[in-house]
Amino acid sequence: MSQSCCHQSHQFDGLDPRYKRILWSVIFINATLFFVEMFAGYQAGSQALKSDALDFLADSLTYGLSLAVIGHSNQIRARAALFKAISLFGIGEFVFTHTLYRSLFQTTPQAELMGIIGILALLANVVSVLLLMRYKDGDANVKSVWMCSRNDAIGNIAVMLASLAVFTTGSAWPDLVVAFAMSGLFLHSAQVILRQSLRELAQA
């Protein structure tokens, strides 16, 4: 097994007061950005921003669940990770379906607002990623936290690129393409977390 950040022989399970404080911090960051980005997504008419806002909401719930099961048995933590994987599948499917619908009734989003909010969200996620980087390896519960933060950073960079492309082309397609890509990222992360959580459940 890989060495944990606490230099133990088993996978890091979150039992670290500093890690818990970091989780509280990133919960606050993600919950705040959910409201900011969802509002901006509707104002800008951007599907990519709204998809990224849902990612912030999912992360807030994921971090809260991760915090709640720290210190519990391996089976409970693996089940929590399994629940998070299923939730990510659901969000990925929702984003894909909604984006597909929006592609049939296109409106060009406001590229300037997309870019501004994208920069703000990226800064928030860079802070979260830097806080959690030390804890990127661990059990399925811990790993799901890291993967959600990583997804956020990737998503925000994609939103900024989409805003530039929308501004340059005057087309809604870059915004929709990013939203489709983010749904794929949700589904891929869900698959990775699902496999590890099932493996840990079998071991438990």
Image (cartoon, helix red, strand yellow):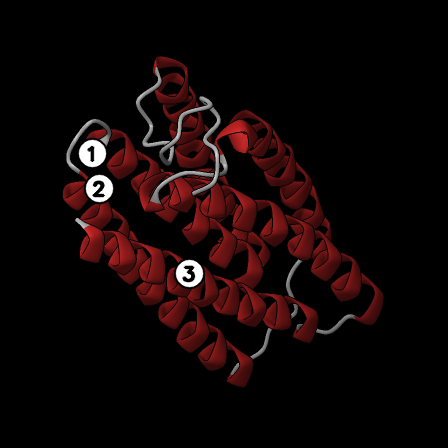
Q: Is residue 46 visible?
A: no
Q: Give how far apart the Cα atoms at labels 3 and 1 are.
A: 20 Å
Q: Are marks 2 and 1 in contact (CB under 8 Å)?
A: yes
| Residue type for callout 2 | Arg
Q: Residues within 10 Å of mark 3 (few under 14, many from 20)?
A: some
The residue at the far bottom in this view is 104
Which quadrant of the view contains residue 6? top left
Rendered position, 5 above or below 31 = above
- The numbered mark at residue 192 is 3
- Give the mark count: 3
Specify whether 19 is left or right of 109. left
Q: Residue at x 64, y 63 (%)?
A: 109
- Front residue (pair 129, 59): 129
- The numbered mark at residue 184 is none
Q: Give how far apart the Cα atoms at labels 2 and 1 are.
A: 6 Å
Q: Residue at x 26, y 52 (%)?
A: 200
Specify whether 171 is left or right of 152. right
The residue at the far top in this view is 17
| Residue type for callout 1 | Val
Residue on which disc 2 sits: 77
- Front residue (pair 102, 10): 10
Q: Counting residues from the N terminus, which is met first, the one under dot 3 or under dot 2?
A: 2
Residue on which disc 1 sits: 69
Specify whether 30 is left or right of 122. left
Q: Counting residues from the N terminus, which is met first, the one under dot 3 or under dot 1?
A: 1
- Front residue (pair 3, 32): 3
Q: Are marks 3 and 1 in contact (CB under 8 Å)?
A: no
In the structure shown, which secondary structural element does the residue marked by tag 1 occupy? helix
Q: Residues within 10 Å of mark 2 (few under 14, many from 20)?
A: many
| Residue 97 x/y as whole percent | 40, 77
- Front residue (pair 94, 134): 134
